[in-house]
Amino acid sequence: MIKIAVLGGTGKEGSGLALRWAAAGYDVTLGSRELEKAQRAAAELNAALGKDMTRGTTNRDAAAQADIIVMTVPYAAHAATAESVKDVVQGKVFVDVTVPLDPANVRRVKMPPAGSAAMEAQQLLGEAVRVVAAFQNISAEHLKSLDHEIECDVLVCGNDKDAKQQVIELARAARMTAWDAGPIENAMVVEGLTSVLINLNIKHKVKAAGLRITGFLRP
Amino acid sequence: MIKIAVLGGTGKEGSGLALRWAAAGYDVTLGSRELEKAQRAAAELNAALGKDMTRGTTNRDAAAQADIIVMTVPYAAHAATAESVKDVVQGKVFVDVTVPLDPANVRRVKMPPAGSAAMEAQQLLGEAVRVVAAFQNISAEHLKSLDHEIECDVLVCGNDKDAKQQVIELARAARMTAWDAGPIENAMVVEGLTSVLINLNIKHKVKAAGLRITGFLRP
C-alpha cells in the first residue's frame, strides 16, 4: 500500500487531503513540527473516519517512512520545512501544495525569486527529488466533508511524468479531476491562480471559488 | 457608441473578437501594420456579418480614433505595436490580449522581465494608459462562429476598476462570462494559463481547452 506523509498535516488543507486519502484506503501519516500537535490532529481525523486509520508524528519521521510526501504549510514555513526533510525524501515523489501568498496583499500575485514555491522546493531539495506541484487551488472548505463534491479541478505540474501520474491518481482517489498542466515552470500559474480565486472569494463574498477545465469530454 | 480598435485585427483572435463586437453593435475598426491587409480583413468580416459594419486601417489610425484599444498581436510584435500607438492611446482603455509564448516551448510558461506582457505594456505606455489584461485564454476556435457558445471564462486584470468594468461589459457583449481577476500583477497567471491550455490541447488532441470559474452562482 502506498504510504503518504502529509507535512503540515495539522492545518485545514493538509488534514482535509489526509481525510480523503485515508478514506480511500491509503496509509496516511500526519506530520507537524510538534509531535503532540500531529498526534492530536490524527486522533481528530480518526474520530471523523470512525476508525484508527491515520497517525501523527514529526514532519521528519513522517517523510522518512513515506513513499509520497505532500507538503501543505504556509509559505513562511516552506523553505524550512523542505530543508528539514531534504535527506529523507531523496528519490521520492514530493508534492508541493504551497502558495506563496504576499502577506501585504493576498489578492495580488507575487512569486518568490525562484519563480514559484515549487521551483524553490526543487532547488532546495535537489534534482533527485521528484517535485510535483498540485492541489493549491482546492479550498480546504471543499475537503473537510467526505460527501461534498469538489467543483474544482487539480492542475498538476512537474518534470517527472510518472510522478505526475501518481499525483493525478491521488487526486482521483480523493474524488477530484486532475490535469497534467505541464512542466514545473508552469507551477507559478497554478500557485498564482490561488490569489485570483481569493480575490473572487473576497469580492463576491463566497468561500470556495474554484475552476474547471473545459473544452473536451471529462475523463 | 463606443469605438473599438482591434490592433492586429487581421489575426484569428482579433478578427474573432471584432466579429462578435460588431455583431453586438459596437463600432469596430480593424488595425494592421499594413493598410491593405486591414481593409481585406474588414471586407471578409463584413461579408460574414452580411453588412458593412467594420473597416480596416493602420494600427495607428485605428488606435487614434478609438475609445477602447484591443491589442491582439503575437508576442514578437508586442512591444513595437504598443510603442507605435503610445501617443494616441494616452488616457484610454488599452486591452492587452498578448500571451508571451516561448517559441522554444509553447507549453512551458516563461514571462518577460517585466513580469508579463500586460505589465510590459503598462511600462511602455506609461501610467496614464488604463491597461487591462483580458481574453488571453479564449481560443480563436471559439470566436469564429457567432452561434457557438463559449465554454471558457474571461479573467480580467488591471489597476483601473472602471476600465476593468468596461472590459467585463465587452466580454458580456461577446457572450462570454468575465471575472475581475485582480490587479495587473495577476496578468502573469492569466497569460501563463494559455500555455497550460495549449499543453492540454496538444496532450489530449483537442482544439480549445478552456476554463470556467466555479464556486458560486454564475452572474
Image: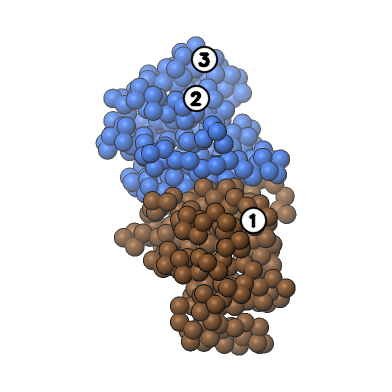
Chain colours: A brown, B blue
Q: Which residue is mark 2?
A: B9
Rendering coords of residue A40 (x, y %):
52, 87
Instruction: Report helix, strand or loop for mark 2.
Output: loop
| Mark 3 nearby-residue class (10 Å; few <14, some 14–19, many ≥20) | some
Instruction: Report helix, strand or loop for mark 1.
Output: helix
Q: Which residue is mark 3?
A: B37
Residue at point 51%, 75% (across, down):
A59
- Image quadrant in which you'd find residue B79: top left
Question: Quick check: B68 above or below B168?
Answer: above
Pointer 3 or 2: first along the chain: 2
Q: Nearer the viewer, mark 2 or mark 1?
A: 1
Left or right, residue B162 beside residue B175:
left
Question: Quick check: B39 above or below A79?
Answer: above
Q: Mark 3 to mark 2: distance in Å?
A: 9 Å
Q: Nearer the viewer, residue A135 or A36?
A: A36
Q: Nearer the viewer, residue A88 or B105?
A: A88
- Image quadrant in which you'd find residue B83: top left
Residue at point 50%, 60% (across, down):
A125
Mark number displayed over residue A21 = none
Residue at point 62%, 67% (across, down):
A68
Name the chain letter of the residue that bears numbered label 3: B
Q: Mark 3 to mark 1: distance in Å?
A: 45 Å
**Please, which residue is most extreme toward the front here?**
A87
The answer to whether residue A83 shows anywhere in this view is yes
Q: Mark 2 to mark 1: distance in Å?
A: 39 Å
Name the chain letter of the residue that bears numbered label 2: B
Q: Quadrant of the N terminus of chain A?
A: bottom right
- Image quadrant in which you'd find residue A67: bottom right
Amino acid type at image mark 2: Gly
Q: Which residue is mark 1?
A: A164
